[in-house]
Structure formats: C-alpha cells, structure tokens
Amino acid sequence: MRLLFSLSVLFFLSLHIRAQDLQQNISVHDPVMIKHGDTYYLFSTGMGISVWSSADMKNWKKENQIFSQAPQWAVDAIPSFKNHIWAPDISYYKGTYYLYYSVSAFGKNTSCIALATNTTLNPVDKSFKWVDHGKIIQSIPGKTNWNAIDPNLITDKKGEPYLAFGSFWNGLQLVKLHKNRLSIAQKPEDLITIASRKENLNSANPPSVDGNPVDAGGNAIEAPFIFKHGNYYYLFASIDYCCKGVNSTYKMIMGKSSSLKGPYVDKDEKPMAKGGGTILMKGDANWYGVGHNAVCHFDGLDYLVFHGYDASDNGKPKLRIEKLKWDNKGWPSVQ
C-alpha cells in the first residue's frame, strides 16, 4: 500500500511538473516585456498582438489579444493584412503605456508602424481600454529603401523620443518623434541608418549571408533594440534568418555609442552601420537560432528577453529570458 501511495504521489507530481513546464515554455515570436504593479506583461507577434501575464516570469497566463479584428486603416494600407501583427514594443510615459506595432506584407517593405495606448495593462481594471492611433510611419516598395517594421522606442539624454526600426533593405533606421510620441518629427528621407550588414550601403551586390541567397537587398538584419546602461547606449539587433524552424540561423549582435544617434561600434571599433556588430548570442545544440531581443531592467537586474528555435521541439519558437551581466569595459554577456 505504501509503495502504491508513493507511486501515485510521483505520478501526480510528474503531471504537475509537466504542466508547469508547459506554462514556462510558451511559444512566442518577437517578445517584449514590461512590469505593471506586481505583474509582468509580455507582448509578442500574433493575431491581434499576443499578450501574456506572469507574477514570476516563469508561469505565464494567456490574455486576450489587443485587436479582436484588423484595424480598418491597416487593411486599407495593406490589403493582404489579416490581423497578424508583428513585433510590438511597449513603453511607459506620464501615466500612459505606448504599444508600437507592425503590419506588413511578408517579404515586402509594404509595411507600417502604428501605435496603440492604454492607461493600464491590468485587464480587470475599469479604465482598461486600448486606443489605436493608427499609422506612425510607412514604407512603400520602390519609394523607400527601408522597411517600417520592428519598432523600438528610446529617449535621448534630454528626454527626446526616437523610434528605432527596420528589417533588411538598407538596414536599421532611427527617426525622431514629437514629444507626445504620436507622430514622427522629421521627414522620412532624413532618417539615420544606424546598422547594416553591408559595408557599403550603395553596393549593388552585397555578399550572401551564411550561404543563403540574397534577398531584400541581401541585408539580413532586423529587430533593433536600444538600451541605455551607464554612459552608453547599446544597440542590439538580430542578423541572418529567422522563422525557418530547424533551418533558422538567427543570432544577436550588439554595439555601443555615447550618443543615441550613433555611430554604434562593436568590440573591434567597427561601425554597425558598415557591417560591424559583436555576437552576443547565437544558436547551439539546443537552439537552432536565437534572436529578436528586448532588454529589460527589473529590481536592479537586467534581462535579455528573446525567442529561440527549440531543437528538442522541431524548431518551434519558444520564449527565453536570461540575466545579463556587464564586464569592466561596459559590455554585456548572458549569465
């Protein structure tokens, strides 16, 4: 009887552990995280923007998506758009949460970055309501040689807001916003290119990446995220190829600058705008590729939040959260 009881306890314990692992091991693309009160909120690519909540960054609860149906302005701008929204970015400013997001036609720079705001992230709060402000900036094939996706908001030392964004084409861009963060404050043709895999942005024949055929200009870089630590701004980006499951070659690079506008240089002092970038993290035996990261600061600790393609689960994209540490030269690494 004692043996039977022990086996029963082990059986139910194993079920609990498996359930807990399932909660921790959620499938996401392009995650970003913020803390509201005692709760962490995770936003990621998905239908209407996927949202998760957690009390401990381990056990996650799926919340309702932001948009139950595609915003009409987005359908008008991109007729093929079906409410699958990419790469959100969340920030907080003067009592309001700002959620920038991307709508796009896959493989084309027919894209827009838009904005929704809310005064709370708690879905049971009476004031909980997302207000969509529509398009912030748009890229158009044959007119703009950049792609308006993968936004990230960052402020300079004077508190002026900027939006970093971009994927392939001419690389990662930086645009100034108005103080209310609702629109851009400069002409699209005056954008600053802060990172590229091309040493020469005017090159007609850039090299292939990891032997893959060139496309979208052969410039396999995207997902900028700028984080201020000490006296420097750090630009993180993802290079090579995401979204290919077991064939994904995604990896994260980084550079730093004393100015938000750059130039950002890697550990060898090579500008990221001319092909530079020190590898922060890449795939291994357990993960085919890793990338599209955010960096978050909670309770005195810095965290790298990203997705990886799980080698134990046929390359399925999974959430990963790792602590960052900083060396005496001011460079981060994964603990």
Image (cartoon, grey):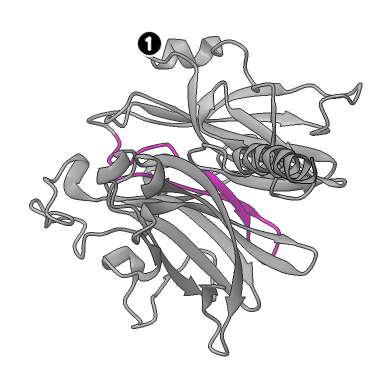
In the figure, 272 relative to 237: above or below?
Answer: below
Which residue is at the front of the view, 132 or 34? Answer: 34
> Image point 67% across, 39% down: which residue?
11
Residue 333 location in percent, x, y? 51, 74
Instruction: Give the magenta part as a residue range.
Output: 144-169
> Image point 37% across, 10% down: which residue?
79
Residue 309 location in percent, x, y? 39, 46
Q: Quadrant of the C terminus?
A: bottom right
Q: Is residue 91 visible?
A: yes
Residue 186 location in percent, x, y? 50, 44
Q: Residue furthest bottom?
A: 328
Numbered-mark total: 1
Whether residue 298 sits left or right of residue 265 in the image: it is right
Query: In this figure, which residue is indicated by the disc labeled 1?
Result: 79
- What is the magenta segment's predominant secondary structure? loop
Residue 76 colored magenta? no
* Numbered disc 1: secondary structure: loop
Q: Is residue 310 visible?
A: no
Whether residue 100 sits left or right of residue 188 in the image: it is right
